[in-house]
Image: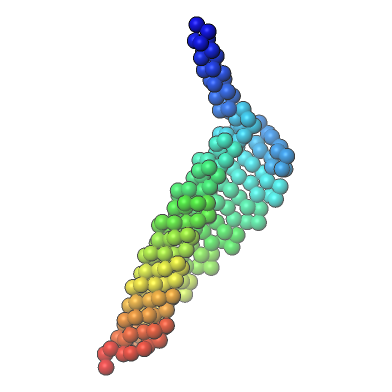
Amino acid sequence: MRTLRYLIGIVLTALLFSQFATAQISKSYKYKNGNIYEGEIDGWTRPSGYGTMRFPNGDRYDGYWKKGMYHGEGTYTYAAGGRCEGNWEKGKMVGKGTIVFPNGDVIEGEFTNGDTQTGNGKITFAKGGYYEGDFNDGVPHGKGHRVWPNGATYTGGWHMGAMSGQGEYVFETGAKYTGFWANGLYNGEGTYTDSQGRVTHAIYKDGKVWRKLDE
């Protein structure tokens, strides 16, 4: 009988602390580090639910929290300009999201570790043009399409931010190169067609004709 009462006491205590930890109370709270929070908190005064945190440097986060960490839909706005908005897990942006940089560039797509984009996405440049395709660690990697402000385009392979593999570059003049690339330059077999329709089929090395194949 004594053992049963002891077990019941343990269960009731656990339930009490569980409810205390998860209870959501709307409150304004200032932390020792200078952060000011307004919103829902749990019994341990940790942000849980929806709320806004203002940081001493002027940054702020508006959105959902869990156990004191960004968790759920939210937006982190930088005092210096720019913002990160999307889905957060344990303090990091994960899944679909958008980053707006202070210079006006915008990245949209899949994020795996905060500001690191991996998977399919799009970056639109404030000065004109865009890239749409595969990313790895925040840079074009895989297959993608790039448009420059002057109207030039490239469609094909990328490796860590540089045109690589097979692809086609169309100049603003209408000339184009179709073939292999490495480190952002023609490398390997390819065909260059100028704006007048004249064709040069050759092996290229570092952007220059190494050996013509049609002579």
Q: Which residue is drawn at 51% across and 14% down?
A: 7
Tell which of 82 and 89 is nearer to you.
89
Q: Residue at x 58, y 27 (%)?
A: 21
* Residue 135, image x, y percentages: 43, 60
Q: Residue at x 37, y 65 (%)?
A: 143
* Residue 60, image x, y percentages: 63, 46
Q: Residue 13 occupies which quadrant of the picture?
A: top right
Q: Residue 28 occupies which quadrant of the picture?
A: top right
Left or right: 85 as drawn, with respect to 133: right
Question: Eyeballing the image, is 74 above or below 19?
Answer: below
Task: Look at the image and tell me whether residue 197 can be seen.
Answer: no
* Residue 8, image x, y percentages: 51, 13
Question: Eyeballing the image, is 38 above or below 189?
Answer: above
Question: Eyeballing the image, is 212 above or below 40?
Answer: below
Task: Look at the image and tell me whether residue 35 can be seen.
Answer: yes
* Residue 98, image x, y percentages: 50, 53
**Residue lying farthest bottom?**
215
Q: Residue at x 59, y 38 (%)?
A: 68
